[in-house]
């Protein structure tokens, strides 16, 4: 079997590696420049704030769905818990926002540890349980005493962010998330995750600690949505269970990630950018049927572009897989 | 036994009959097609609006809407099957992609109902004569009583269909082994379309029953019923129609009992907790029938 796949020469591999790094650097610079120019050129801050939020959410979701093979349809649970953690820390305990955000991320990780037993489920079972767990989180928080979570009125943070501050903060969070995921896709852990996703038994035979690897991927996937929820809470200044646990958060995250293509670093980023623009340019003009279009677009996406933009491209040009992060 | 418990029991069975219908249709879909229908709740609410519309437009009583809803939704299912499902089998992971597809379908359906009927909660302003009937010491509304009758009739009908007719037997066979049944010459595409349409038809008539049993519905109450449906099919063992029927009644009784003894919010959590607990502890369903079906 030595010649089953033509092995690349060392020079070839190095060349591929160089191109890969160059493309990654180019994309990073392009994305950074684009968002840095938003305030300078006086573009719509709110629109781009949410674009970055969706990029981060979709990318983090990709760690779970693309790298690890778990589809958490209750992804909003992490987002909502993050939002409430930030709100409670800032409002009730007077913690500075910059400290509250990492703590929210940790709250997300703790929640993921609580949900860790569900990782032994797979496919549709995992998706359904995840959905139910998000429901439990929403019900639990909305039934906590009003002094803590503000009941049905939610919590007003009372220290409203300057839109620009929140914008830069979101940008920093996005940068950290993308750097983490880029690192992950290159790391031993990332390779192990993919190996476990494709064949857990074989990975186990090769000495991969399946449970631990899955858990690490799961914790990374939980950290960022929790932080996103916190930043958004700070940005809008108000948190309540209806918006913080809105299933549309999960819907958009999943759809944007799938639109770009799961399993690649660039996929969810491109997907989130493309869909955000599509949303802004086309759908916004028809506010009444916005939801309808979102649903129909999801169906069309699954039927005609199930691998997303990047996934379809890589299927047509498999040799590019070496070059595209 | 106190009257409260009796009350919970009777209403649990009535509500459970509805949940059993949800579970029956969902498990038929999953068993034959490996599709978990995320849009089931929205379809059900579509059935409620169907009855609402017919009553508002031509004064048709809800019970007369039951067969009409079943037939219309059956036809809708037939069309939807050929539009949606054949393409799906080409994707890498059809099972999870079907979940996503139906997710989109549910959003689209809810949005359509929102556009047509608005976001307000509706109820059908139709009352039976007499308003309530006595079952033993317990009084239930006549509407609920009829709903129970309809669910019992549908259960019997589906039982006869699944166990006594050739297409029904083919459906059960497809649940057991999708490949083998093609070897013996069954057209799996048409059979799947049949399962899909039956599931849609049952969803439609369940919606009419919901308009009888529950006080109100709005375009967004579908998600709740989808989740209850998921709970029921997981309890019954995915893809097992009989298990789903039993689990539906069981869950209905559990829910009504919980609402007798626990505060409202906690009763809701009980449902989710039953689901999570079952999946983690007994993934083959409460009765463990999946292995031996």
Image: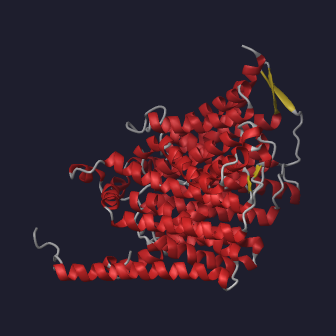
Q: Is residue B16 above or below residue B95?
A: above
Residue that extends furthest to the bottom in the rendered view of this protein: A41
- Which residue, as the protein is rendered here, is positioned at the far top? B1
The residue nearer to you, when weighing A278 against B124, is: A278
Residue, x 37% and y 82% (percent of image)? A22
Quadrant including the C terminus of chain B? top left
- In the picture, which quadrant includes the N terminus of chain B? top right
Picture coordinates of residue B177 (x, y %)? 37, 50
Q: Is residue B186 visible?
A: yes
In this picture, residue B24 sits left or right of residue A113: right
Residue B108, x across and y down, in percent: 66, 65
Does residue A282 appear anywhere in the picture? Answer: no
Total number of numbered discs in the rendering? 0
Q: How is the image coloured?
A: secondary structure
Q: Nearer the viewer, residue B93 or B205?
A: B93
Q: Residue at x 68, y 28 (%)?
A: B258
Q: Choose between B185 and B101: the one closer to the eye.
A: B101
Q: Position of residue A230 (x, y in %)?
A: 63, 56
Q: Is residue A292 above or below residue A24?
A: above
In this rendering, position of residue B256 left or right of residue B288: right
Residue at the image point whose x is 41% and y is 79% from the top:
A25
Looking at the picture, tell me which residue is in the foreground, A118 or A152: A152
Judge from the rendering whether residue A4 lies leftward or rightward of residue B83; answer left or right.
left
Find residue B147 and report its horizontal and vertical position in percent.
Answer: 74, 39
């Amino acid at each position: 079997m030595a010649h089953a796949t033509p092995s690349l020469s060392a020079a070839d591999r190095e060349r591929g590696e160089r191109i890969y790094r160059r493309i990654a650097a180019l994309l990073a610079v392009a994305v950074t420049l684009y968002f840095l120019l938003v305030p300078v050129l006086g573009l719509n801050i709110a629109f781009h704030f949410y674009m970055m939020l969706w990029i981060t959410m979709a990318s983090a979701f990709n760690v779970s769905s693309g790298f690890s093979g778990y589809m958490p349809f209750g992804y909003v649970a992490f987002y909502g818990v993050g939002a409430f953690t930030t709100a409670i820390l800032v409002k009730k305990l007077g913690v500075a926002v910059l400290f509250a955000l990492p703590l929210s991320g940790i709250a997300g990780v703790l929640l993921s540890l609580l949900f860790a037993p569900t990782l032994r489920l797979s496919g549709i079972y995992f998706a359904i349980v995840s959905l139910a767990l998000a429901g439990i989180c929403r019900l639990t928080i909305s039934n906590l005493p009003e002094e803590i979570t503000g009941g049905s009125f939610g919590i007003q943070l009372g220290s409203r962010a300057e839109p620009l501050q929140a914008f830069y903060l979101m940008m920093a969070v996005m940068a950290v998330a993308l750097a983490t995921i880029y690192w992950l896709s290159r790391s031993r852990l990332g390779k192990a995750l993919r190996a476990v996703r494709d064949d857990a038994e074989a990975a186990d035979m090769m000495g991969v600690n399946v449970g631990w690897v899955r858990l690490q991927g799961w914790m990374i996937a939980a950290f960022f949505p929790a932080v996103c929820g916190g930043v958004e809470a700070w940005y809008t200044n108000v948190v309540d269970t209806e918006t913080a646990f809105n299933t549309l958060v999960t819907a958009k995250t999943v759809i944007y990630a799938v639109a770009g293509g799961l399993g690649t670093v660039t996929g969810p980023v491109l997907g989130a950018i493309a869909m955000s623009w599509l949303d802004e340019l086309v759908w916004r003009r028809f506010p009444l049927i916005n939801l309808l279009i979102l649903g129909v677009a999801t169906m069309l996406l699954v039927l005609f572009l199930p691998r997303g933009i990047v996934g379809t491209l890589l299927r047509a040009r498999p040799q590019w897989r070496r070059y595209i992060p | 036994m106190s009257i409260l418990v009796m009350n919970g029991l009777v209403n649990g069975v009535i509500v459970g009959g509805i949940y059993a219908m949800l579970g029956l249709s969902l498990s038929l879909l999953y068993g034959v097609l490996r599709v978990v229908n995320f849009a089931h709740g929205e379809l059900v609410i579509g059935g409620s609006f169907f009855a609402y519309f017919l009553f508002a437009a031509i004064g048709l009583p809800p019970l007369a809407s039951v067969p009409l809803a079943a037939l219309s939704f059956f036809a809708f299912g037939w069309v939807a099957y050929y539009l949606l499902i054949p393409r799906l089998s080409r994707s890498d992971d059809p099972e999870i992609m079907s979940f996503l597809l139906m997710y989109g379908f549910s959003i689209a359906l809810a949005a359509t109902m929102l556009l047509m009927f608005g976001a307000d909660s509706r109820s059908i302003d139709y009352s039976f004569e007499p308003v309530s009937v006595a079952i033993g010491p317990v009084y239930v509304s006549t509407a609920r009583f009829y709903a129970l009758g309809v669910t019992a009739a549908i259960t019997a009908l589906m039982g006869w269909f699944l166990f006594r007719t050739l297409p029904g037997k083919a459906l059960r066979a497809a649940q057991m082994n999708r490949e083998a049944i093609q070897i013996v010459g069954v057209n799996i595409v048409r059979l799947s379309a049949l399962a899909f349409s039956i599931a849609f038809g049952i969803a439609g008539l369940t919606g009419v029953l919901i308009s009888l049993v529950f006080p109100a519905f709005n375009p967004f109450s579908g998600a709740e019923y989808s989740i209850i449906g998921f709970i029921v099919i997981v309890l019954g063992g995915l893809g097992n129609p009989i298990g789903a029927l039993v689990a539906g009644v069981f869950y209905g009784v559990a829910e009504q009992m919980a609402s007798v003894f626990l505060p409202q919010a906690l009763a809701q959590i009980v449902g989710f907790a039953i689901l999570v607990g079952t999946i983690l502890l007994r993934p083959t369903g409460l009765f463990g029938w999946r292995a031996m079906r």
